[in-house]
Amino acid sequence: MRIILLGAPGAGKGTQAQFLMDKYGIPQISTGDMLRAAIKEGTPLGLEAKKVMDAGQLVSDEIIIGLVKERIAKEDCAKGFLLDGFPRTIPQADAMKENGISIDHVIEFDVADEIIVERMGGRRVHPGSGRVYHVVYNPPKVEGKDDVTGEDLIIRDDDVEETVRKRLGIYHDQTKPLVSYYQAEADAGNTQYHKLDGTQAVDAVSQQLAQLLG
Ligand code: AP5
Ligand code: ZN
């Protein structure tokens, strides 16, 4: 099963990716996590990406498309994968098509901007795995610690309110057009398009997902 999770920053893509990975046994491909790993390793890509990400801008299509193509070619993606945070521009979506990579389900997470700003203020992440928590809505078992490894949770550098608002602006300008792009793909019979109410509680959103994916 090949799935695209489409939604604004903070809409809950990473949170539900965790649920879907466990349920369907397919890997999560999060371009954001891949870029953060490159930053941590101090690679040339990481150094370049850090400036762009801290400013709330998008990394170039060329770099991102290269990363994803390389990742999808790996063996663990043979049974399917979960794209989280990709594609987020029309050229990125076109690149998938041009490379013959079909998608079974596109899932749009619908959440209003003001809810997102509030969510990002309480987000905590485990940098090693990309696991996501919220101090109120999805707290870890032990405050400040990852449930699985017990390691420290951190606040992402791009979660300051000013940067979150910038990222939301870019989402509306550059990523939202993918909604009609994939609705048209669904009309042409090339994929299935689903819109989810992402404002419900984490478990309720997971239930909606399980129902529509079967
Ligand atoms: P990326 O890491 O992809 O960030 P994003 O798309 O902005 O999305 P987020 O990770 O912020 O949100 P999410 O939807 O995963 O929400 P989450 O589940 O964490 O990208 C970061 C940067 O990398 C980009 O800005 C860009 O620079 C670059 N980049 C990445 N991909 C790129 C690409 N394809 N092209 C170009 N550049 C790229 O949830 C958020 C919070 O809400 C958490 O605290 C969570 O616990 C909580 N929460 C989740 N669900 C619920 C719920 N139902 N109710 C209450 N709280 C909830
Ligand atoms: Zn995420």
Image (tube, rainbow, N blue to C red):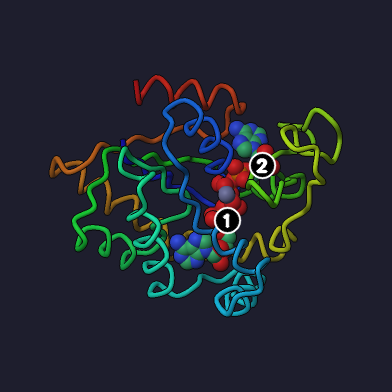
Q: Secondary structure at mark 1?
A: helix
Say if 124 sits above or below 162 in the image: above
Residue ID at (31%, 37%): 79
Instruction: For ligand 1, tell me if the residue under mark 1 lies within 8 Å.
Output: yes
The numbered dot on residue 132 is 2
- In the foreground, 130 or 135: 130
Q: Type of residue at label 2?
A: Val
Residue ID at (35%, 26%): 213
Q: Type of residue at label 1?
A: Asp
Quadrant housing the C terminus: top left
How packed is label 1: few (under 14 Cα within 10 Å), some, or many (20 or more)?
A: some
Q: What is the quadrant of residue 183 in the picture?
A: top left
> Where is residue 114 drawn, in percent x and y?
65, 47
> Where is residue 77 drawn, in percent x and y?
36, 45
Q: What is the quadrant of residue 95 in the picture?
A: bottom left
Name the residue beneath numbered marker 1: 33
Instruction: For ligand 1, tell me if the residue under mark 2 lies within 8 Å.
Output: yes
- In the foreground, 16 or 75: 75
